[in-house]
Image (cartoon, rainbow, N blue to C red):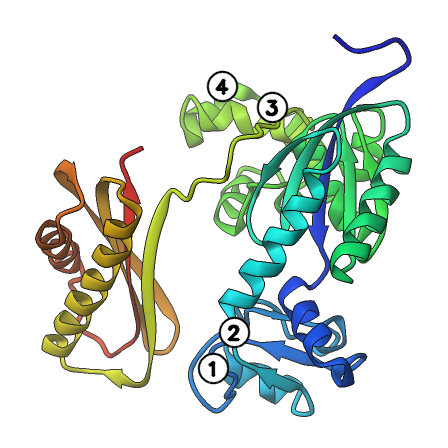
Amino acid sequence: MTLAGVSPWVLHVDLDQFIAAVEVLRRPELQGLPVVVGGDGDPTKRGVVSTATYEAREYGVQSGLPLRTAVKRCPDAVFLPVDKEAYDAVSAEVMTTLRSFDAVVEVLGWDEAFLGVDTDDPEALARAIQQRVRQATELECTVGIGDNKLQAKLATGFGKPRGVYRLTHDSWYEVMGELSVDALWGIGRKTATKLGDAGITTVSALASADPYALAAQFGPRIGPSLILVARGRMNSPVVGTAHIPRSRGRETTFQQDLADWDEVRDEVIRLARRVADDVAAEGRDVARVVVKVRYRPFTTQTHGHTLAAPTTAAVELERAALTALEGFTERRPVRLLGVRAEFAD
């Protein structure tokens, strides 16, 4: 029960340039410099950017960009290798700090979480969160405030960096109405293109779209849900259970393309065995195995295979990965392979 004068709010806490910020803390001499983290830190090799400091982003260096492209855009940047263990440790400290507040905390990943709170001053609470995270880790974060998770998540983008921003039902159309539909959380490029083909390009246009027409185009569940998102509506509550990964995967980028598909098959087997080891350590049954292939130069495709029954057996996961690999009919040179096991629960 909410006390008089106190309202329920959702806060989205997002650590600013998290991975790069952790690296700069470890190397204070890099403060203010363009820093790029990705792969093994060698931009002459294949790999992608995990994250970059704001100084590097000014040159167009973004997450997912090939390292070789990043060094062309920002040749003076400092390139560093990914150190997952360090990021895990700092992330755990941040989440422990967030749980010190009287709030329900839903962890989204390394660097972000939702907080469900009852307060009469969400901005004051947001600033207290920023201060406590800063004291505990020396990291900066942005806090978005909303009536629901959708609004809070989007608000964070307007508050970056180090800011606090509120987006609610009252301000939704003023802030979001004329933005492109792909500004909405959960609407990607493909969906935006399909909406554009139907003459729907802005959030306001999507919010007022015909639900029957969208149901016909996207399906009876997805179509109407897109309209709800465009109206700033989301009923999903903040859940305080521990973050449980839905899958485990391994992938590798080859410095020289694999042109021989016998070699591709061998690499898929190797990756599947590594994934099987990860799954065995976690003790959760796998329902489906997905193989990812990135062809030269940068075209990515995936194929999956559903197991007859959930299992952790390495031989079954390997067999499923090879079955999924058979779905790739093009035998072009391969620059990256991945195998992902999707859990049954």
Q: CA distance from mark 4 to mark 3?
A: 27 Å
Residue at point 61% right, 28% down? 238
Which residue position is annotated with label 4? 212
Q: Amino acid at mark 1?
A: Asp
Q: How many marks?
A: 4
Does residue 283 appear in the picture of this structure? yes
Callout 3–callout 1 Cβ contact below 8 Å: no
Quadrant where the C terminus is found in the figure? top left
Give the image quarter of residue 61: bottom right
Give the image quarter of residue 146: top right
Callout 2–callout 4 Cβ contact below 8 Å: no
Q: CA distance from mark 1 to mark 2?
A: 6 Å
Q: Nearer the viewer, mark 4 or mark 3?
A: 3
Q: Amino acid at mark 3?
A: Pro
Left or right of 294? Residue 114 is right
Which residue position is annotated with label 2? 82
Residue 220 appears at what percent x and percent y? 42, 21
Residue at point 79% right, 11% down? 2
Q: CA distance from mark 3 to mark 1?
A: 39 Å
Marked residue nearer the N-terminal end (3 or 2): 2
Q: Nearer the viewer, mark 3 or mark 2?
A: 2
Which residue position is annotated with label 3? 237
Residue at point 60% right, 21% down? 235
Q: Residues within 10 Å of mark 4 (few under 14, many from 20)?
A: few
